[in-house]
Amino acid sequence: MIAVLPLLATAGAATGDENRGIELIVGTTALRDDNLYRLPEGVSPPEAGLPSDRRADRLLGPYVEARVGMEQAGQSFGLRSRVSRDIFDDNDAYDANRLDAAATWQGQFTQRWRTELQYAFEQRVTSFADFRNPERNILDLRTLRGSLSFRPRPDTRLSAHATDYRGSNSVTARQTSDYRIRVVRLEAARSGALGNEVALGASRTDGAFPNRALVGSAPVDNSYQQEDIDLTLVWRPGEATSALLRGGRATRRFETVGERNFAGPTWTAQLSWQPTGRLALRTGFVRDLNAVDDFDRLYAVTRVQRASLVYALSSKLTAGIEVSRQRTDYRGDPSNFLTRLIGQRPARADRAEEQRVTLAWAPRDRWRVNAGYSRLTRRSNLSTLDFDANLTQLGLEYRAF
């Protein structure tokens, strides 16, 4: 279901300055998903222990969003709240009310000091791609973020960022995955003409899973520390083109089960080209590391390639195309008693692709109509994880004021 959310977000997106005045937006989306549970071909929901005999379903998603913002004496304040409901045609056990809200304060003190503080709350419906559960699972996310930036001179920036993430699941079977993650990051940057910049950054992450009990024979830990260091280059050779290159190394250590420690390189490359006000092209490549809780694997290496094109057919009609490919390889040997007793399974390797086409039409100043189609596929060396899905979406939005 996680793939549904980006489509729904398209209809909820709004343009304009969020830091001025009051806005009220109402809308709804209609979506059809022909493989809601992300099942392999030929597998029915009852065979997977799910409470339905249909692979496809339709979803209606009405929502109301309010935004309030104001600026005064170099300070800006913003509030945003969105209430939505997921209404399934056949699988009404997964119907859900969701609340998203955020409060933001931004302050600038002289030309050298700038600060920002934000608190956000979000509710997500867990994907079926890897967790096929007969119950609806709502993930509550709370984020507290603060940053402070200082410019001793116009071309030099020193900044500090601190973030506290908390996530909790509604389904009991998933509550061992509840987490609290705290991140502190420091950056030093030097900028030049046209906004070109070189930045050196370092961060420390402390993560904990408060509901995960440690068992002496189990190769799973309930806390970790991670250090990241990276170098970023932002290059703008002209007004139409910008590029970002970032390379670094991540090292993760677990407090109790040291066999799960891992480290490796990470990198990001992005290129944007907007030759006119009507056309925008973007492409990007990412390599990242993520921990996994499998008894015989330590971490996953994820490589993502993405490209998108947005073209304004007219002042009221915009079309977009996006393609992405993701390769995830599971690696590492924790050398625990289970791997010695029964051996390691073949290392999991996934290949996922998405092709997406969107169309946005603004027939009047206050009205917006969105349509979209997405094709999702995943192929794995573990055949039970394969799936194909087609999603079609139509959204209608009205900006009341």
Image (spheres, helix red, strand yellow):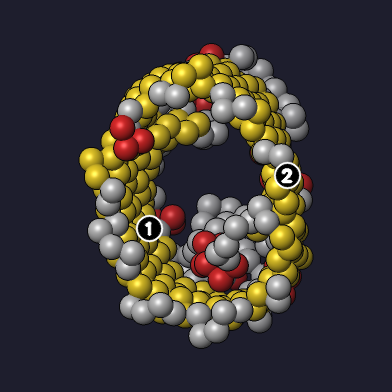
Vertical arrangement, residue 179 with respect to residue 358, above or below: above
65 to the left or right of 344: right
Residue lying at the far bottom in this picture: please name it. 363
> Which residue occupies the foreground of this view, 383 or 185?
185
Q: Quadrant of residue 378?
A: bottom left
> Can the viewer see residue 378?
yes
Q: Secondary structure at mark 1?
A: strand
Q: Which disc is residue 378 wearing? A: 1
Between residues 56 and 96, which one lies in front from this camera angle?
96
Of callouts 1 and 2, the N-terminal one: 2
Split into 4 quadrants, where in the image is the N terminus?
A: bottom right
Distance of label 1 from label 2 (alpha carbons):
50 Å
| Label ID, residue 72 | 2
* Position of residue 165 in the picture relative to residue 249 (left or right): right
Numbered disc 2: secondary structure = strand
Q: Nearer the viewer, residue 177 or 184?
A: 184
Q: Are marks 1 and 2 in contact (CB under 8 Å)?
A: no
Residue 303 image offset from top left, x and y in percent: 34, 41
| Residue in the picture at 37% in, 27% down | 191
Q: Would you place residue 305 above or below residue 32 in this image?
A: above
Q: Is residue 394 visible?
A: no
Neighbourhood count class around disc 2 (C-alpha, 10 Å): few under 14, some 14–19, many 20 upward: few
The residue drawn where x is 58% and y is 53% is 131
Amino acid found under the numbered disc labelled 2: Gln
Q: Amino acid at mark 1?
A: Arg
